[in-house]
Amino acid sequence: MRIDILTLFPEMFNSVFSESIIGRALKNNIFTVNCINIRDFSEDKHKRVDDYPYGGGPGMVLKPEPVFKAIQNVRKENSRIIFLTPKGKVYNQKIAKELSKEEHLVLLCGHYEGIDNRIIENYVTDEISIGDYVLTGGEISAMVLIDSVVRLLPGALGKKESYMEESHYNGLLEYPQYTRPREFNGHKVPDVLLSGNHKEIEKWRIYQSLKYTYLRRPDLLEKKELTKEEEEILSKIKLNFSN
Ligand SMILES: NC(=O)c1ccc(NCc2cccc(O)c2)nc1
């Protein structure tokens, strides 16, 4: 997979590409990434990339030409041209999985008050928001998208990193995790996890996953097909926690 990032602040990405899973995935050629400064495509002698909004109003708007030239410079046959914006479709693991199957992603990071709408109408294929809040620019949203997509690419996760997709993103919240020591500040690890009884451990984990999801994200339960066993456990949870 190749990812091109169109931004006015390419240096913001340096640390995220040198560290941890992304850094290793780059080193192992699991994917390639390239940051492009939109300002390099500004034609006017002052290198302007933004201007005042027609119709008045606060803030500045990214001019269409520099963005268009930057997109044309990197786009391929089936590139997904993704604009990160508070107006976009709210991002989730399902979208991450879909994007991880693409050959080429172009991430367009807006600043100021956004971008000339003619770019969105005619050249952007996807508008994505990472959540309902406004950031200074789309760069942090782009980093979130890159991290969540790259870790799904074959070979990105070493054998050490568990690919948690199954346990905590089979549509339910993940069960609680513990490690050594057995007792810490008087707080003990649940006995079942020390029992070596894998059947009981699995049951406890399913119970915890369903409990947390029921209490914190009942919306996820609505969408989830539960097995008969899970349904039975959930009805016990509902009795225990009927508020
Ligand atoms: N929720 C998000 O993913 C998100 C994305 C970008 C952003 N800021 C740049 C921007 C871009 C476009 C319009 C605009 O008003 C602001 N803020 C939040």
Image: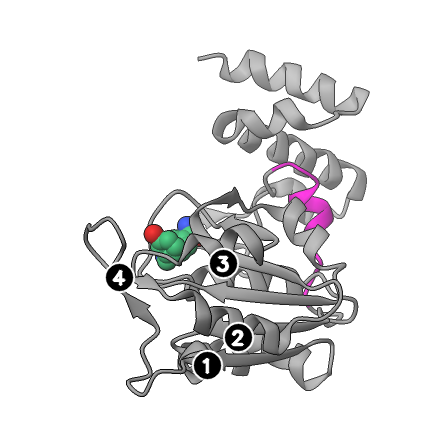
Pointer 1: residues within 10 angstroms few (<14), some, or many (20+)? some
The residue at label 2 has a CB less than 8 Å from ligand 1: no
Amino acid marked by disc 4: Met
Q: Residue at x 31, y 88 (%)?
A: 45
In the rendered structure, which segment of residues is drawn in magenta? Answer: 161-172
- The answer to whether residue 185 of the structure is visible from this angle is no
Inter-mark Cα distance, 4 to 3: 15 Å
Return the mark for residue 83: none
Q: Is residue 171 part of the magenta span, yes or no?
A: yes
Q: Residue at x 69, y 21 (%)?
A: 233
Q: Earlier in the sequence, mark 2 or mark 4?
A: 4
Q: Please, which colouring scheme is shown?
A: one colour
- Compare marks 1 and 4 and give the one earlier in the sequence: 1
- On screen, residue 127 versus residue 28, left or right, reads left
- Which residue matches tag 4? 60
Q: Are marks 2 and 4 in contact (CB under 8 Å)?
A: no
